Image (cartoon, helix red, strand yellow):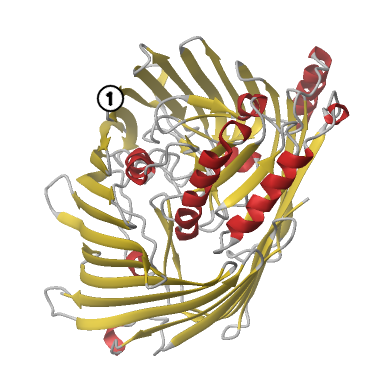
Amino acid sequence: MTIRILTVLALLALAVTAAAVDYPVSDWTLPTSDGDEISLHEALDDGPVLVSFWALWCGPCLKELPHLEGFAAEYGDRLTVLAVNVDSPRSVHKVPSFVSAKGYENIHVLLDTAGDVQRKMQTGGTMPFLALFDRHGREVYRHTGYREGDEIGLREEIEAMLAAGAPAAAVSGGGGTMRVSDQFEYSYSTESDKEIAENWLDAVYSEGQLQLGVMINSQQPAEEGTRRNEVRHRFVEYGDDQLRVRAGHFYGMFGRGLLFAAYEDRIIRTDTVLDGLWVQGRRGRWRGAAFTGAPSALDLDVRGTDHALAITEDLSFGVSALTWQAPTTPIRDGSLLRDWAASARLEQSLPHGDLYAEYATRTHYVSDGAGDWLDRDGHAFYAGLNVHGGDFGLSLEAKDYEDFTILDAADSHRPLNNVPTLTREHLFTLLNRHPYLQDADDAVGYQAELAWSGRRGWSALANTSSTETQDGEQIYEEWYLQVEQDEIMGVHVRLGYDAKESDGLELGTVVGEFTWLASPTSSWVLKAEQQHVTDPGNEFGSLGKYDQQFVSLEFSTAPHWSFTAMCEFNNKFEAQRDFLEKEGPFPAAQVSYVTEAGDLISLWAGQRLGGYLCAGGVCKWEPPFQGVEVFGTIRY
């Protein structure tokens, strides 16, 4: 898509309308966890709105949610609370049962599985992130992260907003708004004398139904050693809730990501953005989308379409299709060979739960090495059932994937689809050290999770998951039990035990988190983790057993500061260490500061072991590191 075409589209959009701006903040619409839909502007029609982004794997988010529920209940019709969940296909199915078990009945839980609203509001991927809008859609407060006592400052902001109101002249009747965010990362290794300096500058201009966006990425150098300043993303978008057209770079997801899930995660360096044209619309009970675009690292064009029809208020049916053709693919019988994939899905709301099921199939071509091309078929099946009532919530999931990686290395690293992995994302460091590495070409398995929230502050969670190959070989299995108590002698306690077989290792892990509120705005959080690892080795012998421990102590003062000291230990002998790993211990410290404007800046210094960073079932290996890191997000 050339700059000339983008310019023409922008001028055409401006010529079509000069509609007045109802609210200075751009509108968006998301499904709720119970099957409805809510748009930001519709919520603003009823008065002030508080928007908070959270995820099941985000510990501070889970601490903030009860306060948001309390505000929603206390202020009633005077304040709408939208809790936007950003869990990926890996975890999103557990959200309804979690919300029900916790008894969150006053907040509106929305699902931003594809990350569309996260990008529109430029959260920077840091959570929790919240923004407070007055009844005229003006952002009057924002904050990043959660520290015990942050709810006190938030209450003060809500009270001041409700008391002040706004004069009628404050309502915008025209003019555009600009949102700019700057995310940066700098690291220096004291061992290799290597530096990494990378910056992402995001700018979005909105006027009426028109949006123009650009993102400039500066690499001086990046992790891969590249040095450049380049426009990585640029787009023109025009439309409303009924019809929207976007030219340039775009992301998106069909269903639960079996066919198509283009997304960005800067932490694990994933960016499967496409460059082309995206159109989406809705009318009555139908909604649909279609696109044509090219992945950044592949010399081919992809066409896709997705349609969903609400047959009844509780039942909807959807279909998706994807096709692509590489320039190197030959012609057979006078026709170009095209790869394709298609899926059908069913979503059913139940009296005490919901059901989701999707089946997909694909055909693609591979060379036999002798000048001919062979047809190959693959399939993917995913189903999830939620059942909840009273204090309990049960989540069940199943998967069956065979030869279903679509366009591997769409961004040089990741495929264009992201199927659910059916494994749990944990709140503790060592529990995520040996994840299941997603394989959409060969996986059969299940996951079950039971959540309970009782009286007097007690709650519990039990989870089990298992993945095998198509031939029945066990490659991953996990059992996890967690118990929480809101207050034992003034301390919030979370304890857990995990038994896992992963990557050829047998792991048993005990974890604990203890939070003490020293004052209304200051707290201490102690995390302690102990993991016992058995390495069966191979036919030539076993590498034996070892233990590793991770301990962190955090002191926070709301709403600005947090100080964390952490250290990891292990008793590995030489043959058990990674080739870059040294003998421990591995100490580190971090200081984080949240500004009055809600910006976050963090400084980390010390040593850490190598390990995986995972997001949405996609993992990236990080080698051992010793040095200094600075990172943050600033919004203008």
The N terminus lies in quadrant:
top right
Across and down, in percent, residue 424 comes to 32, 54
Q: Is residue 150 left or right of residue 4?
A: left
Across and down, in percent, residue 67 comes to 51, 51
Residue named by callout 1: 350
Please give the count of numbered marks on the rendered protein. 1
State which quadrant residue 548 falls in.
bottom left
Q: Is residue 430 left or right of residue 323?
A: left
Q: Secondary structure at mark 1?
A: strand
Is residue 139 visible in the rendered image? The answer is no
- Front residue (pair 2, 279): 279
For the view shown, which residue lies furthest in the top direction? Answer: 284
Q: Eyeballing the image, is 595 above or below 276?
A: below
- Identify the residue shown where x is 59% and y is 65%: 223
Q: Eyeballing the image, is 154 above or below 576?
A: above
Q: Eyeballing the image, is 101 above or below 174?
A: below
Is residue 191 visible in the rendered image? The answer is yes
State which quadrant residue 531 falls in.
bottom left
Across and down, in percent, residue 47 comes to 66, 30
Across and down, in percent, residue 307 comes to 44, 18
- Front residue (pair 412, 32): 32
- Identify the residue shown where x is 37% and y is 20%: 319
Amino acid type at image mark 1? Leu
Q: Is residue 70 left or right of residue 362?
A: right
Q: Eyeballing the image, is 520 above or below 118?
A: below
- Front residue (pair 52, 19): 52
